[in-house]
Amino acid sequence: MLRIVRSWHEPLDRALEVHHGFSASDLISTIEKMVSLHQKRLGDRFILLKDIFKGRTKKKIVHDFFVRYEGVAGDPAELLDSLPKRMSLRSLRMMLQVHADRWLMMEMLIDPSIIAAQTGQPVAKVVTILRSLSMVPGCLEDSDTQHLFLANPVWQKPGLHDGDDFLFFIPQSIPAFLPVILRDLSEKAGIVDDLDRRKSTYLEDEISKVVRTALPSACVKSGVKWQWQGVQYDTDLLATFDRILLIAEAKSGSVSSSALRGSPKALKQHVKRLIVEPAEQSARLTGILKLATEGNSDALAVAAGLGFDPHNIDAVVRISVTLDDFSTMAMSEFELKRAGWIPQDLKLPPTLNLAELGSCVDILSDPLDFLNYFAARERLQGATPIFGYEMDYLGMYLENGLDLPELLAGTHSGMIAGMSFAIDRYFLSRDTGSPVAKPRILGKQ
């Protein structure tokens, strides 16, 4: 995700630095080092406590804890004398663990000079970046708490600062909200139109690269234009692989803060623009190709203009790809149709963000598995309400190919959260330098 965000914002670096004093690349590098530092501190703390608690006597454990764990003061003999005589080693370890947790906040302090040394940036620039990611204590005191669930300012500013002292509890959360953070910075710098143009071209180019990686022998066409009944249409990507046609639509739009706060009007507009319109576009072309196989002359003319014979296409696979993450909203097909925000007869294609698409390509290295996954995804998503996100669907596909008769028949709802465990573990282990085996389709070598 960080690679994607960095590469799509790089052309805007200069303008952001002129206005804010730092670029998008500077911001991302700082976040990377913060996350790395935080994870190292917590990892070292875990290893230290584990080693201390290896002691086989109360005296050994207590003395090691006082000597080796930072922030512990006092006389270990006094603590030993105060312990109940029948206290077990397990109870002692639990008591010391609770005491150690009191020092945990100190591990979350961020020293700008340490980050500056690791990134090669001036300390003053790092301070400016950390200030842009943090708030002063009490600044949200008058906020409407009803708005905090869907539009929480802490998402964009997860740190606290008092002067040049900075506290970040969970810096790992920042990458998930980087697009929102950088959009806000771009708006303040007056370059949001440049950002939107960059997002659009970047997404289309990246989808083409990813699909070419997934389907190396496919015929891939980007930015295809065609006419139907006097109206000009665009399809962002067409890829023909053997007798299968992949239609991919790119949507680089963002969900506004008013929609996140629960504005029905704003949210409905976003659903129409980011979910319904690309679904209608790919469904329209799918329907035209079906008409072409039935001999419709106008449909045959469209197919000829696209450069392939519709009689050589046995299956059409549709996907919609975004930069921002609202795939969970797109998966709520039943709920959106019940609300009347999606036409009842419209089948939604799988909607996923660019990072998720790349993950699917990584896990499903066989082109036929890649295509079959999205075909099965569309069938299952439209059959019954399912709670989960893209990697949960992918994890379930590895287990059973999404071939679940009860769900496909619509007689049961699905709770698939957690099916992504093996996939999450694979990517996390790779990022931390201790890779594990890649998850594979059950029964497939």
Image (cartoon, helix red, strand yellow):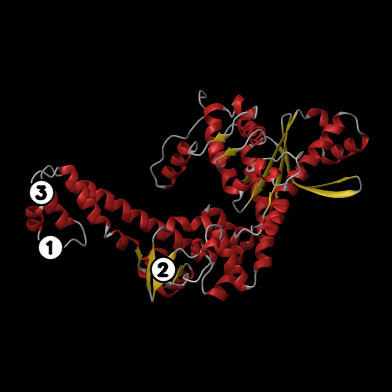
The answer to whether one can see residue 418 in this image is yes
Say which label, 1 or 2, has the lower sequence index: 1
49 vs 114, left or right, is: left
Q: Return the residue at label 3.
A: 84
Indicate the secondary structure of the residue bearing disc 2.
strand
How far separated are the C-alphas under marks 3 and 1?
A: 19 Å
Disc 1, SS: loop
Quadrant hosting residue 380: top right
Give the amino acid at mark 3: Pro
Give the class, few, some or many, for how many residues have Cα within 10 Å of label 1's Cα (few <14, many ≥20). Answer: few
Q: For mark 1, what is the residue?
A: 74
- Badge 2 is on which residue? 160
Q: 153 above or below 301?
A: below
Q: Are marks 3 and 1 in contact (CB under 8 Å)?
A: no
Marks 1/2: CA distance?
Answer: 31 Å
* In-image side of 242 versus 5 (left or right): right
Mark 3 element type: loop
Question: Residue 365, image x and y in percent?
Answer: 57, 34
Q: Position of residue 405 (x, y in %)?
A: 61, 24
Q: Give the vertical position of 73 relative to 40 (above or below).
A: below
Q: Is residue 53 visible?
A: no
Tell me which residue sits at (9%, 60%) in the image.
Answer: 75
Front-most of 61 and 371?
61
- Residue 62 as seen in the image, left or right of residue 298: left
* On screen, residue 226 above or below 117: above
